[in-house]
Image (spheres, grey):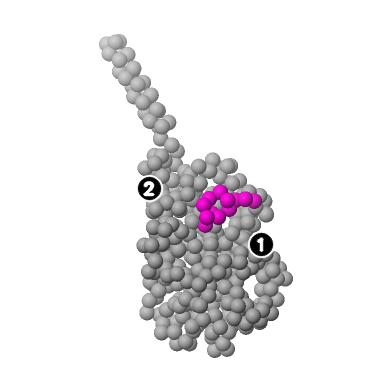
Amino acid sequence: MTTRRHLILALSAIGLGLASTVAQAQPAPVTLLNVSYDPTREFYVEFNAAFAKHWKQKTGQDVTIKQSHGGSGKQARSIIDGLEADVATLALAGDTDALHANGRWIPKDWQKRLPLNSSPYTSTIVLVTRAGNPKNIKDWDDLIRPDVKVITPNPKTSGGARWNYLAAWEFAKRKYGSEEKAKEFVTKLYANVPVLDTGARGSSVTFAQRNQGDVFISWENEAYLLEKEFGSKVDFIYPSLSILAEPAVTVVDKNVDRKGTRAVALAYLEYLYSDEGQDLAGKHFYRPTSAKAQEKYAKQLPKLNLFKIEDAFGGWDNAAKVHFADGGTFDQIYTRK
């Protein structure tokens, strides 16, 4: 009896030991927070699920990715103020640079850590009109007509709005021949803006659901989403010149090192460059950077006449100082109603 009892106890101990070993081998679940800008919501919902499946198969670890969206500049400020982002996938590198300048949340050379200046996908700016284009809007210069109301977000809080502003400015500079003429043009354009929402998605709602304005200056992917949802109510056109928008991504070093999430956060961003990540970018109307995905989505994302911010404005640092800093050109030209 004693021998049998000892045998049962020994087997139980072995079972507990095996269970403990299995538990130790199974990595603890991890949660990431991706702080992004307005129009990426739908893309990252699908991408997050794809990455979680990939990471589970690769490592056995469960990962949950939470999302936060808003105007890009406002989102950067939230991280600076303590929002515990593991990764920042903002609308423009200038907003991400603010994470270094205000608290050293990331290193100064953050953009060199991933391929293509940490921009796994690109986009551009287009013009969304009412169905049938009743105001016959064909290009940027139609946006300064007195009979046209323009919907665009606030460049003080929205990264997309800054791309919009700079695209219009460069069009006018090339067409009319000087910075002074460009300033006059953009002044007239913003005089036609009845309301400035804080982010691109807010402006999308203002245009498509609240039926304000005749034309919406939009991210390309947001225009496609509007077409899918409100196909009978909206059209969109490509202007003769637009800007190559290069949203950049980064881990937020202070947060991932404190939380112990650096490895999975970096893998999450690297997966944006994978075949699956690139395919999902194209599926959600972002312009993929891989040749394979570019070929697949070439019909829906045609080649355009695009300029780079470095060539036209000397990069984001210079553009921000001249146009968007307090007292800059935008403050000079925009009269709040």
Quadrant (top left/top right/bottom left/bottom right) for the N terminus:
top left
The residue carrying pointer 1 sits among few (fewer than 14), some (14 to 19) or many (20 or more) residues within 10 Å by Cα, namely some
* Label whose residue precedes the other's in the sequence (2 or 1): 2
Quadrant (top left/top right/bottom left/bottom right) for the C terminus:
bottom right
Q: Which residue is mark 1?
A: 317
x then y, percent, for residue 36: 52, 58
Residue at 42 percent across and 58 percent down: it is 291
Q: In the rendered image of this protein, does residue 177 appear above or below residue 37?
A: below
Q: Does the magenta segment cover residue 110? A: yes
Residue at 36 percent across and 62 percent down: it is 296
The numbered mark at residue 97 is none
**Start-end of magenta stretch:** 108-119
How far is mark 2 from mark 1, CA to CA? 38 Å
Q: Secondary structure at mark 2?
A: helix
Residue at 44 percent across and 77 percent down: it is 236
Q: Which residue is mark 2?
A: 53
Residue type for callout 1: Asp
Residue at 51 percent across and 46 percent down: it is 266
x then y, percent, for residue 139: 51, 81
Q: Secondary structure at mark 1?
A: helix
x then y, percent, for residue 220: 47, 70
Q: Does the magenta segment cover residue 28? A: no
